[in-house]
Amino acid sequence: MASSKGHSSAGKARLSKIFGAVNIGSFRISAMIMGETENGDLIVLGSGHRASQGIKRGYVIDMRAATYAIRDAVERAEKNAGASVQSVWVACAGAGLASNVSKVEIEIGGRRIEEEDVEHLLIAARDTIQPDGRMVLHAQPAHYTLDGAHGVANPRGLHAERLGVDVHVMLADGAPVRNLTEVVQSAHLEVEGVVAAPLATSYAVLSQEERELGVALVEIGNDVTNVSVHAGGMLLGLRALPYGSGDITDAIASAFGIRRFQAERLKCVSGSAIASPSDHREMIPVNGPGDEVTGPLARGADDKNRIARAELVSVVTQNLSQLTDEVGRALKAMGFSGSRAGQVVLTGGGAELAGLAEFAQGALGMPVRIGRAPTLTGLPEAHSTPGFATLAGLCLYAADDPVDIRAIGAQYQQTAKYGGGVVGTQMAARLFRALKEYF
């Protein structure tokens, strides 16, 4: 939980907790402050964003520039919230994320399952985690099995010969994650936890039913597209593609010989993933309102520096085809194809392109919808878009506070809390709560 220096209220509701979240992207850096009322309602107190600096393909490449941008984004959110935060949850989209599922069983011998059995099982599961020199971001129990039968939410009080658990483990490369935490700490903020972006985003855009039945989540960022498959309540597989919406912007700039900011505006204002018969007749200005009208004309432009919309759409769809081909290959490699395929959810800033769901549905041969940030009290309309889904998901993840099996037993090695220690009594209390409520 992020701590508050100031008092904030939302209407007459009293806040019991305040969470801070920062999403450090290559295109923008965004921050959100969310409050939880005494009766459990979540309220967005403030959010803010600014252009990214010092980040490339999810990695910190300039500590000083990134620190400044993070501090600026958080201060904008604090100003809107009327409250300060000292610690934040951080999303990680790069760092070589990898996901696997660890399955563990213990003998019960037909007797009734007690709380001690569940704890013994989770300790056994914790001891099976083999990070192979990598950092463990998450190790979360998803569901239990009784004598091999899946889908048991709470095994206490039931009889079984064998009790098992499926644990979702998320690994990352240590150095990039440490760079991420250090750049946040340099902005005078503690890090509550680093959360894999696909996991945070899933909290915002996927329903619990989708996560149980099976769904693919495709988050199109500026430099990276994360493709993840969720089923049985877990993130089962993950592929990071080094290609994003920024590559489409670059292709437009290159095709017409124009500046990158002009290409970005053209893509957002006039770009589309679906061609229309009228595109050939529609001429769109390369220069936006207030742009300098001097300089060379765009390649293929008329004397007023306008290009045919059809030419722009052609460049966009050509590059989208490359992206959807890569996404399709990634899904197939994770077993999400043919009869085992299902709903695909597109999100991230790149999912805001007009006509994208229709294009992707045709290219992938699967049902596709756009995933937006959920409707949260206090969330501005401008931030309820696909580009802010990860940020909202981070706050929802913080509020849910899912149990991590590494918090169980004396061998717990702390990796979740980066800014100061976790008090033993707090950890014991949290474990007790987990066993009573979650399990």
Image: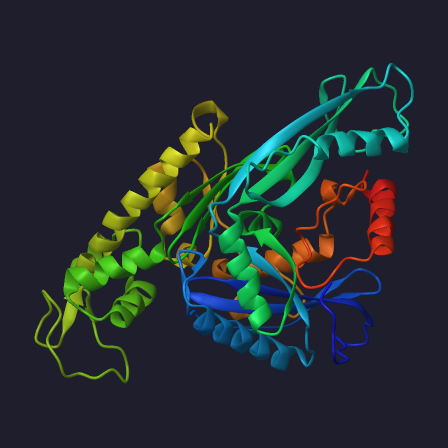
Residue 401 in the image, given as x and y percentages of width and height: 73, 52
Give the side of residue 84 with respect to residue 90, left or right.
Answer: right
Give the side of residue 225 with respect to residue 11, left or right.
Answer: left
Up-down: is 132 above or below 146? Answer: below
Which image quadrant for residue 288? bottom left
Residue 310 in the image, given as x and y percentages of width and height: 19, 57
Give the side of residue 308 with respect to residue 245, left or right.
Answer: left
Question: As rendered, which of 168 and 180 lies closer to the eye?
Answer: 180
- Which quadrant is the N terminus positioned in? bottom right
Residue 229 in the image, given as x and y percentages of width and height: 52, 37
Q: Is residue 112 visible?
A: yes
- Which coloring applies here? rainbow
Up-down: is 231 above or below 40? Answer: above
- Which quadrant is the C terminus positioned in? top right
- Residue in the image at 25% along x and 52% along y: 275
Up-down: is 168 above or below 425? Answer: above
- Residue in the image at 58% along x and 42% along y: 170
Label tally = 0
Residue 156 in the image, given as x and y percentages of width and height: 87, 30
Q: Is residue 50 visible?
A: no
- Residue in the image at 32% along x and 67% along y: 269
